[in-house]
Structures are given as structure tokens and as C-alpha cells.
Image: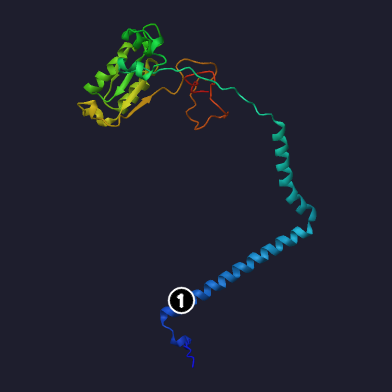
Amino acid sequence: MRRYSEIRYTYGTQNDLTPGEEEMRNSFSTNTENMGETTNKLFLLNWKNWTLQARRPFQTILDILFPVLISLLLLYLRSKVDPELRETQYYEAFCTTPIIIGSLPFLCPQSSQKISDDPISMILSLTGGNGTPFRELSLLYSPKNPEIAKMMGVFKLGFNDVIAVNNSEEMASAFKLNAKKTFAGIQFDESYSNITDLKQIKNFRATIRFPGELRFPNGMDNDWQTEFIYPPLQKPGPRDPDSSTGAYPST
């Protein structure tokens, strides 16, 4: 004889429910009613929209065909534009100013033969020299520190003067007062003001501050346009394809 387990469900009346159970049941009933009302409103809006579309068949056809026609027109115009193929362009290697003279062949093996073997002449040629406008300009840096002063001393060969200030605020003020005679400002981290050995720095941090306008005009665009995040006229490829060191900031 088979035995069947009997499961009985007891449905209590409203008086048998605890206050918490009654609150849960009322909340569930309210949510169910709200969902039903929202669904009815959705069906009502869709029915109204379909009715309006059916009454205006010409407009309905245009609504469907217009995006398709625009896409086909764009594809047709794109097929009529011939792609411009550019030949591979190779740029000549260039070298920045080295701090350690002996490392020049290692850092710049391509251009080491083009520079004079005389270290003083080499630094003068790379940093401006006596015969260029850079010799009339000064270089600022912060903060004041004997070790940083030794490192910055090499730039005295290329600039009129290398001036140390206490902090970045003083450097900004000095830059504004004498902007025409100041080439740039090198702002080192403020924590370097009391350092006694630069070898202790694992991650060297510095910021170079330049003026907001070009010092030597190049045509009509003499502004660096720093108020823009992106160029007003974006074009593909390098900004100046014929320059090995990059384009002017205003281009």
C-alpha cells in the first residue's frame, strides 16, 4: 500500500495575522496594483500611438524610410571619395640636451657624430649659445637648494642667468614680473628644498613652466591656444608632417 504525504495549507483570516504580516500583505497588494496601473498606461499609450500612425500612413512611411535613405546616401557619398594613400615617411633622429657628457654616444648614437667633441661648445650649441636670443634670457627654478643649484649650473652656459627662488609661488610671481626676459621656469617638488643628496630621490618630479604665448612669432598663429582641450580644427596624422621634432604648439 502506497503512502502519500499530505501537506496542508492553512489560510488564516485577517484577524489571525500579526501586525508585521498584515503590513507585508498590504504592501504587496499596493505594489501589485501599481504594476497593473503602469502596464495599463503603457498599453494605452502604445494603442494611441498605433492609432495615430494608422491614420497618417504617408507620415508613417516617411518615418520608416527617411533613416534608411539617409544611410544609403552616406554610403554612396563615401564610395565616391577616393582614399588618400601616403608613402611611408622616415624622420631624422634628434637629441635633447644631455646632462652627462659621456652618455651622449649612448643616448644619441645617431647624432653623436654631428656634434663637436668640445663639451663647452656642445652645450652652448644645444642650450642656445652666445649668438642666439636665448643668451639674453634667464631661467628660473624652485626650490632653493645647494644640490639642485649644482645640477642647474650647466644651464648657465646657455642662458644669461639661472635664478633660484624659494617656492613655486615666488617663481610664478617672478615669471609674471619679467616674462619677456625669462625663458622658462623649472618647478621641482617642494620636498626637495631640504634634500642633501639627489641620489636619494627614486622618482624625480619636476614641472616646466613656459609662457602662454610663442616667444618667436610664426605667422599669424602666435598663441598656444591653451584654453582649448582639443584643436579647433582636428586633422588626421601629425600636426606638422615635415618636422622631425614636432609642430609648433599653435598648430
Picture coordinates of residue 70, whole percent (x, y): 72, 42
Residue at 76% x, 54% y: name it.
Answer: 60
Quadrant in the picture for residue 192: top left
Question: Seen from this angle, which residue lies furthest front?
Answer: 1
Q: Residue at x 21, y 21 (%)?
A: 146
In the picture, measured across the screen, residue 79 lies left or right of residue 212, that is right
Q: Nearer the viewer, residue 191 or 220?
A: 191
Q: Amino acid at mark 1?
A: Met
Determine whether, in the image, residue 134 is placed left or right of residue 34: left
Query: Exactly how many numbered labels are in the figure?
Result: 1
Q: How is the image coloured?
A: rainbow
In the image, residue 181 sits, relative to residue 52, either above or below, namely above
Kindly state the secondary structure of the residue where label 1 is placed.
helix
Classed neighbour count for the residue bearing mark 1: other residues with Cα under 10 Å, few (<14), some (14–19), many (≥20): few
Looking at this view, is 78 or 181 the one in front? 78
Left of 218 or right of it: where is 121?
A: left
Q: Which residue is mark 1?
A: 24
* Residue at the spot 71% in from the left edge and 63% down from the top edge: 48
* Direction from residue 69 to residue 113 in the image, left or right: left
Residue 109 image offset from top left, x and y in percent: 39, 16
**Residue 105 point in image, percent of width and height:** 35, 16
**Vertical order, 140 against 60 (above or below):** above
To which quarter of the image does residue 209 belong?
A: top left
> Which residue occupies the extreme bottom position in the image?
1
Q: Residue furthest top?
A: 131
Q: Position of residue 69 (x, y in %)?
A: 74, 44
Q: Is residue 7 above or below residue 180?
A: below
